[in-house]
Image (cartoon, coloured by chain):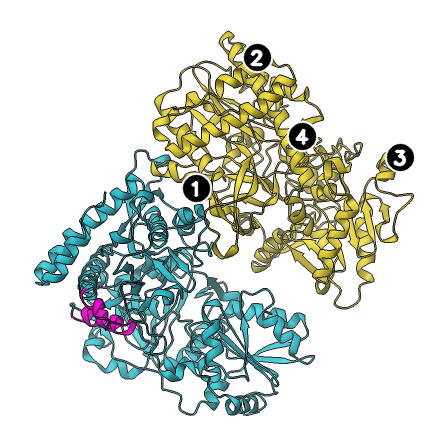
Chain colours: A cyan, B yellow
């Protein structure tokens, strides 16, 4: 949860000396390399990574979620985006140059390398932690300037990282039909029918959440993400699962996977050590006949992708697992609804508690977040948080990816806006909710901007749109009210949400930034979270997780059918922050209907759980607005 | 203007025999080819093409704007999209297979070729009429299946096209500062400074409208588009213009281009025949020193692009000319405003006349379009139409790219909706306007859908959005009201409009289909044209040309500034078609303010021109709605 050390620079003189030594060491490479790239990812291109994969943090000290370090014989530079300029500058010592991405004057990694490298240089990178498309771009740019990019099989950071943590190998949790709605055998059959449809012989699964989903297994190898380190290779008659073999010794897991008594030959799983995926994939590829095709994600590691000969390789932006996982089945939807009810119970309790405690001046961003976690943990099937809570008071709220640290920790008061963006993993579902509240008297300007954000939230949530519409086409609806007043927010409006899986998942979302999202379909689940941020003053965000459902408007153009959203999050939106004059009657009706649902559904559960104070708070906070 | 023949199939037996003979004739190719691709474009990838470039029409008979023909030893197939299925099936004989693009079962050109070709086949195409990116995709797909794509330098259609028209070489029109706002010398200097900024030595201009804009010249080589066949190669000290040399014999043109008395050496234009661009570009490239770069559009022909060695070639999606041309200067804006006033005068007259004439039952789609052209031609500096008028009654209105032909020509009546999408070229500007009217009593459903379209039109026109917003982000605003009722339209919402240039131009627009548009900037001009089409019944579209202007909302987030649109088109929107109950007060205010502007500006001009009946009509049609 952060420590004082996190904000003082890491001393890297000795580490850089060692790394540069390794860059010349023929133990690792045939010829010395003049630069070494350290991306942030792991071999699965995970968004969140395990401590053993925090190589970029190890070498430069910066521990934000996004950033790439490059070390040459003379220079060391680290690229990150606007969210992290301040943090990175505080965490890195002056051996490092901070490359501020998004500023005009900042060179790209390629251009910077070209500007500092001697002629005919060789640049190295670990092919396991760079995706194929990134490799291609970098390789092409360097080649254009007479340099070359080479794959260094041994990771040079690992070579100098003496106390590197071991790769986690946590207990596997098996999920039954009551949680998944489909057996892993059903999912396997569906996957194979997609493969048959496209005449694909093999599929290589590399994304951890896709593997967890496919096998109806969960782990806790990565904080906040209930996944486990694994690969899978699926053929029409073969299933190979690569995972630390020790984890499979548990009878429950063996039975779940039918390791000892497979029902059918083609559903028999061959297990092999995690590390053996490379050689096993080589073996599979060696046996391919002409025209046989192997599917792999274009976001898979370069190392694994290149094992597949080009003539047999079919790169796909979204794998069939990614697409199938995104459309939740009835059981998953039911689970997500249950998880959101429990989550709302915890938050109603939290807000009722905050209302009482804040005037005492003893609640801080950290203690409020801890209280939220404590209340959530009392709910059934709670597993953990789904991401680090963004618990932020006043000016801290304007830092979009803020996470309270002891040195930034502010006390909640009656004078400043409080923004809490938090969520949890329950065995039946994943939650992610943001509420922005004022426990005293908000200013007219705070209410005005909150109301614009609310209008945007409603515009998306209540939107009706044709089947086949991509989420990015809805992004502007969330901004329209802000834009009309000259305001905006610099992040997307929504992301896909997994079901007891990653809180961020593809292939759908609501953002002006992408065009490659897949069309929204009934059963998909996304967040709806417009915001407004006034630097140095406050942040506002209103976030619900919403389910895509069929809509029944008056007409049905070309029989295409229409869709809309149903909120899964059922936590009151603070009426005190709303300037009702700015809302249309339709918007006021939406708020009242939403609050009616909150009262009805969450009220019943609070009653059942005997949580009286929270119930009183809920009833008061869901009174109709005029 | 269409003929009966256009709808009976062209007999192609003999032509196909001759083409297949040419495909084996060593006069044209070293080795026989097994397939020949005939794309629709010209060597400049123009949207509209000259008769001499209608090669696809010549070989198969289909004369729509989009379509690619492929002839193999045994098969002949033609790909086109949904707009043209009916027309293509009527215009092609049974030697041809119609490939309906957009249907699931339809093979792509690549897949079809792979399915019909014998092993190791060679496929030919004229490299002048295929763009580089299309070549790449086709070449890669064919190579993957063991075939190869080759450039056939002599066009095989031209080889068998006995009465092929000659390439037009119309009189060039010089435009003075009063129309252009910038001399061509100013534009050249600005281009060179962009080149210097990016360290580019040469720029090859291939798009006809960019060349016309750069040199402040216009021609009439292609119907509706005031352009002329030319190429230009611009270096830091050199300007080469490739054009039929005869056209430069005119003193006015010689003086305009300062051909005999250049003011400065670097502004001296070397002229050369149109056809010599290939060898001249070869010569330029032969003299390049290492690292020198040549800019060329990624939409330029494969033939010309490949002249530039890869190491020297920088492909750009939008050339600096395309970007500069899109942002109109004060003189161009003034010209566009004047053109739209004249155009509105003609349309007010037309609609007043229609109102009188329609009850007599003598006005048809064709005669109404002719009348519109006649009235426009009475206006100052009229040059011609900017595209074929879409004059459509009742069910014809649902055919989005309809063009009336004698056999489809419907009579305007008091019972059916009339949609007129038309525009003109004036020396001071280009217009494009659609109005949908009912001269009797529209049904409640017609009014309802018209009003949804109007709401969409207003939502875009009145939108306020941050500087830097791309047009595609506004597309959903135009659809929101339709979507809410389960309706939609299957085309984009707007396109860039040239100033006395092509009515469709890049790099901006308002469409869900593209993500590669450039951000909107003050001075850009686009159309705003949502619609609704009920197959077999009617079509509705409301189109204005609008100018991007700065907006001044209440706040100014991060000093980014805001933009909005100002309508240039000032023609009343028929109030009779509006269900005012469905409009918000803000929308009613917008309509009334728009009509006030129409009355004020167009009224004054009608008064000046003494066009009394049209003035009366205008005054009546611009009464405030309640």
Residue at 51% over, 9% down: B361
Circles 3 and 1: CB distance less than 8 Å? no
- The residue pinned by badge 1 equals B477
Query: Marks 4 and 3: in contact by CB < 8 Å?
Result: no
Q: What residue sits right under mark 3 in the picture? A: B251
- Which mark, by number, is residue B272? none
Q: Measure the C-alpha gap from mark 2 to mark 4.
A: 25 Å
Q: Earlier in the sequence, mark 1 or mark 2?
A: 1
Reading the chain from its start, which is encountered first: label 3 or label 4? Answer: 3
Q: Is residue B227 above or below residue A297?
A: above
The N terminus of chain A lies in quadrant: bottom left
- Residue A610 position within the rendered picture, expressed as x and y whole percent measured from the top left: 8, 63
Residue B341, located in which quarter of the rendered image? top right
Determine the CA span between mark 1 and mark 4.
30 Å
Magenta residues, start to end: A356-378
Q: Chain of mark 2?
A: B
Q: Position of residue A507 (x, y in %)?
A: 39, 58
Badge 3 or badge 2: first in the primary sequence: 3
Q: Tell me if residue A201 comes above or below residue B265 in the rendering.
A: below
Mark 4 residue element: strand
CA gap, disc 3 to disc 2? Answer: 44 Å
Residue A368 forms part of the magenta stretch: yes
In space, the residues marked 1 and 2 are separated at their CA atoms by 37 Å
* Crowding at mark 1 (Cα within 10 Å: few <14, some 14-19, many 20+): many
The residue to which callout 2 is attached is B613
Image quadrant of residue A334? bottom left
């Amino acid at each position: 949860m952060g420590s004082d050390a996190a904000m003082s620079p890491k001393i890297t003189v000795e580490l850089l000396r060692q790394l540069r030594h390794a860059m010349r060491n023929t133990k690792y490479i045939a010829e010395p390399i003049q630069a070494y790239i350290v991306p942030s990812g792991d071999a699965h291109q995970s968004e969140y990574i395990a401590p053993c994969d925090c190589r970029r943090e190890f070498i430069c000290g910066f521990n934000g979620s996004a950033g790439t370090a490059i070390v040459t014989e003379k220079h060391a530079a680290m690229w990150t985006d606007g969210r992290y300029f301040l943090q990175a500058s505080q965490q890195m010592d002056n051996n490092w140059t901070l490359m501020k991405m998004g500023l005009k004057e900042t060179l790209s990694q390629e251009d910077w390398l070209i500007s500092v490298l001697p002629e005919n240089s060789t640049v190295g990178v670990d092919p396991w932690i760079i995706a194929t498309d990134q490799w291609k771009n970098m390789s092409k740019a360097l080649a254009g300037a007479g340099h070359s990019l080479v794959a260094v099989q041994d990771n040079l950071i690992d070579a100098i990282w003496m106390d590197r943590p071991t790769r986690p190998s946590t207990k596997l949790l098996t999920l039954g039909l009551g949680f998944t709605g489909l057996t892993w055998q059903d999912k396997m059959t569906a996957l194979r029918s997609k493969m048959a449809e496209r005449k694909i012989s093999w599929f290589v699964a590399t994304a951890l959440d896709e593997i967890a989903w496919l096998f109806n297994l969960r782990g806790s190898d990565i904080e906040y993400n209930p996944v486990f380190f694994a690969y899978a290779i699926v053929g029409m008659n073969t299933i190979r699962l690569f995972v630390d073999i020790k984890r499979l010794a548990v009878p429950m897991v063996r039975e779940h996977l039918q390791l000892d008594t497979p029902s059918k030959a083609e559903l028999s799983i061959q297990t092999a050590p995690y590390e053996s995926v490379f050689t096993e994939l080589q073996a599979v590829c060696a046996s391919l006949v002409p025209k046989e095709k192997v599917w792999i994600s274009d976001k898979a590691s370069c190392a694994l992708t290149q094992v597949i000969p080009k003539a047999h390789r079919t790169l796909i932006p979204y794998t069939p697992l990614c697409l199938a996982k995104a459309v939740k089945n009835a059981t998953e939807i039911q689970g997500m609804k249950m998880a959101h009810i429990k989550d709302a119970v915890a938050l109603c309790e939290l807000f009722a508690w905050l209302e009482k405690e804040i005037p005492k001046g003893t609640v801080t961003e950290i203690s409020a977040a801890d209280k939220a976690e404590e209340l959530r943990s009392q709910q059934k099937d709670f597993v953990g948080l789904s991401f680090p809570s963004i618990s932020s008071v006043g000016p801290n709220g304007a830092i979009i990816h803020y996470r309270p640290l002891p040195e930034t920790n502010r006390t909640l008061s009656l004078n400043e806006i409080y923004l809490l963006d938090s969520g949890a993993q329950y065995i039946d579902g994943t939650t992610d909710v943001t509420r922005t509240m004022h426990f005293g008297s908000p200013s007219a300007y705070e209410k005005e901007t909150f109301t614009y954000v609310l209008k945007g939230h409603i515009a998306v949530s209540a939107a009706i749109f044709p089947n086949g519409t991509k989420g990015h086409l809805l992004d502007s609806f969330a901004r329209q009210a802000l834009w009309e007043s000259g305001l905006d927010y610099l992040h997307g409006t929504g992301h896909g949400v997994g079901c007891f899986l990653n809180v961020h998942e593809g292939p759908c979302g609501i953002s002006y930034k992408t065009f490659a999202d897949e069309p929204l379909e009934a059963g998909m689940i996304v967040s709806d979270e417009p915001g407004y941020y006034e630097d140095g003053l406050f942040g506002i965000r209103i976030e619900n997780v919403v389910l895509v459902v069929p809509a029944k408007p008056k007409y049905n153009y070309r029989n295409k059918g229409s869709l809309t959203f149903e909120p899964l999050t059922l936590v009151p939106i603070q009426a005190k922050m709303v300037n009702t004059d700015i809302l249309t009657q339709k918007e006021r009706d939406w708020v009242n209907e939403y609050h009616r649902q909150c009262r009805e559904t969450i009220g019943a559960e609070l009653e059942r759980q005997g949580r009286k104070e929270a119930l009183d708070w809920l009833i008061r906070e869901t009174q109709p607005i005029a």
